[in-house]
C-alpha cells in the first residue's frame, strides 16, 4: 500500500495533504475530476496533514524564488523532514506539481516523487478549496497574500535595479536599426521625387540627409541665385560643391515643377531631416545607457555592437551566461546549422564581425582574432552583469589586450601577460569605484538636505497662514526701520563730503573723533576707601 502525500505551495505557506485510498483514486480518475468541484466529496478524499505559514513577506518571496528556480529552500526541507513519515510499513510518496522541484526533492531527501495524472487533479482541487481546507484562513486573506506576493515576485523578476535596466538598450537598438532602414527608404523616395526637377543634384550630393536638406533649401531650382550660396555652404560644408550646385541648376535637364508638388516634396524632406536628427539623439541616449549598464562591453567592442549582442541574447545576464564559443557565432545561427547539415565550414564570427578589430585583421587572422575578441567580450559582460559599481577600467584594459594581439599577429611583438594586465585593472578599478562611492555619498547628502529644506518649508507654510496678521504688522515696522536707516546714511554722506574736500578720509575722521573724545572726557576719580586714607596719613608723617 502506498501512502500518497501532496505538497501544495501557497502564498500563505506550505501545506501537506494526505490522499485517502490511492489505488482506488488512481483507478477512478474521471470520478476524481468530478469530485474536485464539490467540497464535501473532496474533503472525503483529501485531509490536511500539516501547514507551515510564512513568517513574513520577505520569507515568502525567498521561498517562491527558490521554488521557481528548482532549489529546495531550508524551510521546505525542514517542513518535509518534520511532517513526512519516512519509515513504516506504508511507503510514502510525495506528489508535486512541478517536475523541476520534484527532481530537486528526490536528490535532496531521497523521496519517491509523483507528478501529473491524479496529482495534478488533486492539486487543482486543493487550489480551489484551499481556504476551506486550512482552519483560520479566509478567502479574503488568501487572496491578499497571493496579490502581495505576486506584486513583489513580479517586481523582483522584472528588474533588480531601475538605473541598470538592459530592456531600454534592447528597445533603443531595435528602434535605431528600424530608423536606419526607414531613413534610407524615405531618402530614396525624396531622390526619385525631386530628381524629376533637379536630377544633377543626386550626383553632386551623395549623403541622404544632406540631400534632403538641400532639396528643402533649394525648392525651385530656377529661383536659385548667388545670394543663397552661403546657406548652401552651411549645409554642404564645401564651397566648391555649393558652386557646382549653382552652376548645375542653371543648365539642368530637369522638368518644371508646380508649386503644389514642390510643397509636398519639401514637407516630406522635412520629415526625413527630423527623423535623421532624432536618430542622432537616440544614438546619444544609447551611448549614455550603455555607459550605465555595460560600460566595459561598450569600451571593448563599441556601443552599437555591444547593444546588439545584449539584444540578441535577451538580456545582459543571459549574455554573461554564454560561453565564448557561443558569443563568437551569436547572430550567425542560420549559417551554423546550414554548415552542420551540409557538413561544410562553420562560420567564424557573427555579430562581432561589425567590430573594427576583425576588419583590421588580415584574412588569415580573422578567425583567430574573432575567437580572442569573443573571449574578452564574455569577460567584459560578466564583469558588467555582476559588479556593484559600474566602471569601464576593465573594458579599456581588455581593448588594449586585443590591440596588442592584433599587433602580435602583424609584427610578432609579444603581448603582455593576462595576469599582469588584470592586476593593474583591479587596482585601478578599486580606485575608481572608491571615487564613485564618494560622489554618490555626496549626492545622497545633498538630496537629504533638500528633502529637509522642503519639509521645513512645508511646515513653515502652515505657520505663515496662522501668522498672516502679525506678518502685516512686522512688514510695516520693517518699512519704517528701513526709512530711518536711509536717513542716517544720508546724514553720514553729507558729513563726509566736506571732510573729503579738506583731504580727510572717513577713517581719519573716526580717529579724530576718538582723540577729541579722550581729551574732552574727564578722568573719573576713584572713591576714597579707609585704606587709601591711612596711606595718605603715613606719607604726611614721613
Image (cartoon, helix red, strand yellow):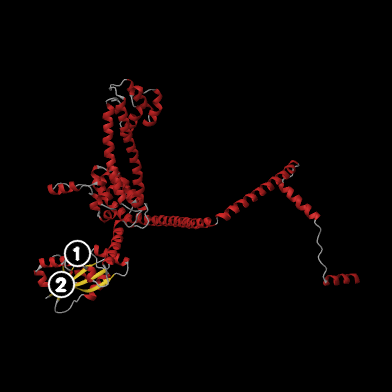
Closest to the observer: 80 or 396?
80
The residue most toward the right is: 541
Kindly report the distance in space between the C-alpha atoms of the residues bearing marks 2 and 1.
Answer: 22 Å
Closest to the observer: 394 or 96?
96
Where residue 219 sits: x, y (%)?
A: 34, 27
The residue most toward the top is: 251
The residue most toward the front is: 469
Residue at the disc numbered 2: 45
- Residue 254 against residue 286 in the figure, above or below: above
The circle on residue 98 is: 1
Quadrant of residue 389 within the rendered picture: bottom left
Task: Kindly tell me whether residue 184 is visible in this rendering.
Answer: yes
Closest to the observer: 193 or 304?
193
Quadrant of residue 134 within the rendered picture: bottom left
Quarter of the image containing the C terminus? bottom right
Where residue 226 sits: x, y (%)?
A: 39, 23
Quarter of the image containing the N terminus? bottom left
Where residue 4 sits: x, y (%)?
A: 15, 72
Where residue 15 sits: x, y (%)?
A: 23, 70
Mark 2 vs mark 1, foreground winner is 2
Of helix, strand and loop, which one carries label 1?
Answer: loop
Quadrant of residue 500 within the rendered picture: top right
Mark 2 closeness class: few <14, some 14–19, many ≥20 residues within 10 Å = some
Amino acid at each position: 500500500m502506498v501512502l500518497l502525500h501532496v505538497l501544495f505551495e501557497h502564498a500563505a505557506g506550505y501545506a501537506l495533504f494526505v490522499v485517502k485510498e490511492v489505488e482506488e483514486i488512481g483507478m477512478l480518475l474521471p470520478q476524481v475530476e468530478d469530485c474536485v468541484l464539490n467540497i464535501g466529496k473532496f474533503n472525503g478524499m483529501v485531509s490536511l496533514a500539516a501547514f507551515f505559514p510564512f513568517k513574513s513577506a520577505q520569507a515568502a518571496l525567498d521561498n517562491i524564488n527558490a521554488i521557481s528556480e528548482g532549489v529546495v529552500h531550508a524551510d521546505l526541507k525542514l517542513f518535509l523532514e518534520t511532517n513526512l513519515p519516512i519509515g513504516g510499513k506504508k511507503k510514502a510518496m510525495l506528489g508535486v506539481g512541478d517536475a523541476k522541484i520534484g527532481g530537486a526533492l528526490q536528490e535532496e531527501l531521497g523521496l519517491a516523487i509523483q507528478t501529473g495524472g491524479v496529482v495534478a487533479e488533486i492539486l487543482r482541487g486543493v487550489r480551489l478549496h484551499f481556504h476551506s481546507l486550512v482552519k483560520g484562513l479566509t478567502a479574503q486573506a488568501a487572496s491578499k497574500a497571493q496579490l502581495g506576493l505576486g506584486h513583489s515576485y513580479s517586481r523582483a523578476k522584472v528588474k533588480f535595479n531601475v538605473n541598470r535596466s538592459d530592456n531600454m538598450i534592447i528597445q533603443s537598438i531595435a528602434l535605431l536599426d528600424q530608423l536606419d532602414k526607414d531613413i534610407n527608404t524615405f531618402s530614396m523616395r525624396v531622390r526619385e521625387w525631386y530628381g524629376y526637377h533637379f536630377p544633377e543634384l543626386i550626383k553632386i550630393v551623395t549623403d541622404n540627409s544632406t540631400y534632403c536638406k538641400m532639396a528643402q533649401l533649394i525648392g525651385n531650382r530656377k529661383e536659385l541665385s548667388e545670394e543663397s550660396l552661403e546657406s548652401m555652404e552651411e549645409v554642404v560644408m564645401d564651397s566648391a560643391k555649393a558652386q557646382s550646385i549653382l552652376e548645375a541648376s542653371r543648365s539642368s535637364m530637369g522638368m518644371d515643377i508646380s508649386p503644389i508638388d514642390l510643397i509636398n516634396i519639401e514637407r516630406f524632406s522635412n520629415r526625413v531631416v527630423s527623423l535623421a536628427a532624432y536618430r542622432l539623439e537616440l544614438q546619444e541616449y544609447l551611448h549614455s545607457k550603455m555607459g550605465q549598464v555595460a560600460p566595459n562591453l561598450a569600451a571593448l567592442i563599441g556601443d552599437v555592437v555591444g547593444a546588439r549582442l545584449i539584444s540578441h541574447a535577451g538580456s545582459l545576464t543571459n549574455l554573461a551566461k554564454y560561453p565564448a564559443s557561443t558569443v563568437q557565432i551569436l547572430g550567425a545561427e542560420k549559417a551554423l546549422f546550414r554548415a552542420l547539415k551540409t557538413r561544410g565550414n562553420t562560420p567564424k564570427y557573427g555579430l562581432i564581425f561589425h567590430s573594427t578589430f576583425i576588419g583590421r585583421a588580415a584574412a588569415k587572422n580573422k578567425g583567430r582574432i574573432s575567437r580572442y575578441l569573443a573571449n574578452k567580450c564574455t569577460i567584459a559582460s560578466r564583469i558588467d552583469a555582476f559588479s556593484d559599481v559600474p566602471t569601464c577600467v576593465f573594458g579599456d584594459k581588455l581593448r588594449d589586450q586585443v590591440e596588442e594581439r592584433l599587433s602580435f599577429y602583424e609584427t610578432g611583438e609579444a603581448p603582455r601577460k593576462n595576469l599582469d594586465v588584470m592586476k593593474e585593472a583591479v587596482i585601478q578599478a578599486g580606485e575608481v569605484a572608491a571615487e564613485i562611492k564618494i560622489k554618490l555619498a555626496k549626492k545622497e547628502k545633498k538630496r537629504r538636505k533638500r528633502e529637509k529644506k522642503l519639509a521645513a518649508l512645508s511646515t513653515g507654510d502652515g505657520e505663515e497662514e496662522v501668522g498672516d496678521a502679525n506678518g502685516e504688522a512686522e512688514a510695516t515696522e520693517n518699512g519704517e526701520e528701513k526709512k530711518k536707516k536711509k536717513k542716517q546714511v544720508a546724514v553720514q554722506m553729507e558729513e563726509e563730503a566736506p571732510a573729503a574736500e579738506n583731504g580727510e578720509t572717513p577713517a581719519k575722521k573716526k580717529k579724530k573723533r576718538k582723540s577729541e573724545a579722550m581729551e574732552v572726557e574727564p578722568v573719573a576719580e576713584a572713591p576714597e576707601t579707609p585704606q587709601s586714607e591711612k596711606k595718605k596719613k603715613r606719607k604726611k608723617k614721613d
